[in-house]
Image (spheres, coloured by chain):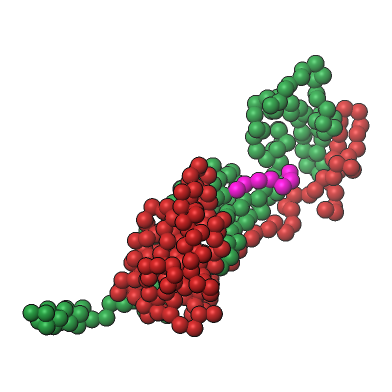
Chain colours: A red, B green
Amino acid sequence: MFGRSLWVYHANSGGCNGCDIEVLNVLTPYYDAERFGIKLVGSPRHADVMLCQGPAMRSTAQALKRAYDAMPAPKLVFAIGSCACGGGVWFDSYSVIGPVEKIIPVNYYIPGCPPRPEAIIYGVAVALGVVDKRVAPVEFKELELPIPRYHPEELQGTGELVIYEKAEKI
Amino acid sequence: MSVLSKLEEARICLKAGRVTLPYPAKPQAAPEQFRGRPIFDASKCIGCAGCANNCPAREILVFDVCQEIRILQYLGRRCTYCGRCAEVCPEKAITMSQDFETATNSIPDLGQRLELFMSTCQRCGRCFKGPSVLEELKMRGYRFDDLQNERWIFRSQARLRGEPAVDDVEIELD
């Protein structure tokens, strides 16, 4: 979709500045993000990618929506940090609406509180198609029950006692 | 003056050499104390829900779908990796891994879901304590295990049919 460099716009909608510092860290020569053509711009009208930090707050939701609408058409949104991905620890307080995807559509999620600079670079590399994503949903199921099942319709009553016979089938 | 300062700057840059890490091409390990994604071990978990009670982000949900199965679900989206779940776990079933490469394009990738088998308490008939003392008062009947014939015997039929065991005691719940 994007043939050239990604110009990113950095929007903090009420975070604690922890993720901001990590994003700043990505742009330093140590984790040089300009290898991938990533450049920080000051206006959403110049940007291809919006980096969202912080949850959607009541006070900043409209400003976030307006900044998203001001970006030109092929646009990506990265949610960086636990607040932007899921609302953060204070997800249920009055002033927090929730994750930023309640306000604007989000394409890529980078969880962490804050995420490491390597994790942010990894997210950008996943978006660029350089590497594959490594996480997948984990599900553990008990395939067979370790005790026999007892069915209530097969119970036998003898006076005061009720007897559950062991059922072979489940 | 400006040319000299530029030359001085170039000298410093050449002296520093190349500092950029070749990160996405070569893997880079996190430091020793780093807390990454928690890993839930279903073979050790006893389903006590201590992690769910201690999670500050309310990320771990525990619910029972039937008498024997308890589901522990970790959503992972607003987890702050504080490690309190691993700290309170009595069986050390939760370990904070060093895995930080969790960037994804769909949120359900971050979740973990365990179906745990819970055996039935012989005294109360449930796998956990009742919600309140008043509800526990309603539980009647005591179960014996007839192990040789592989069957269970209840003393009274009252709690099986859902009738109150003592008619003259009416307990208002809620």
Residue at x-position 85% and y-position 32%: B161
B34 displayed left or right of B116:
left
Q: Is residue B63 magenta?
A: yes
Image check: B121 left or right of A18? right
Viewer-proximal residue, B131 or A84? A84
Residue B46 drawn above or below residue A125:
above
Residue B162 drawn at (x, y percent): 82, 31
Of all residues, the one furthest to the top in this rendering is B168
Residue found 65% across the figure and 32% down from its top: B131
Give coordinates of residue B128: x percent, y percent: 65, 38
Give residue B9's position: percent from left, percent from top: 16, 79
* Total marks in image: 0
Residue B169 in view in this figure: yes
State whether residue B100 appears in this view.
Answer: no
A137 sits to left or right of B82: right
Q: Nearer the viewer, residue A36 or B162?
A: A36
Foreground of the two, B106 or A44: A44
* Image location of residue A156, percent across then percent down: 91, 37
Quadrant of the image occupied by residue A47: bottom left
Quadrant in which the N terminus of chain A appears: bottom right
Q: Is residue B147 rendered to the left or right of residue A158? A: left
Magenta range: B61-67
Question: Does the segment drawn in magenta span residue A53?
Answer: no
Q: Residue at x 41, y 58 (%)?
A: A12
Q: Residue at x 46, y 67 (%)?
A: A50
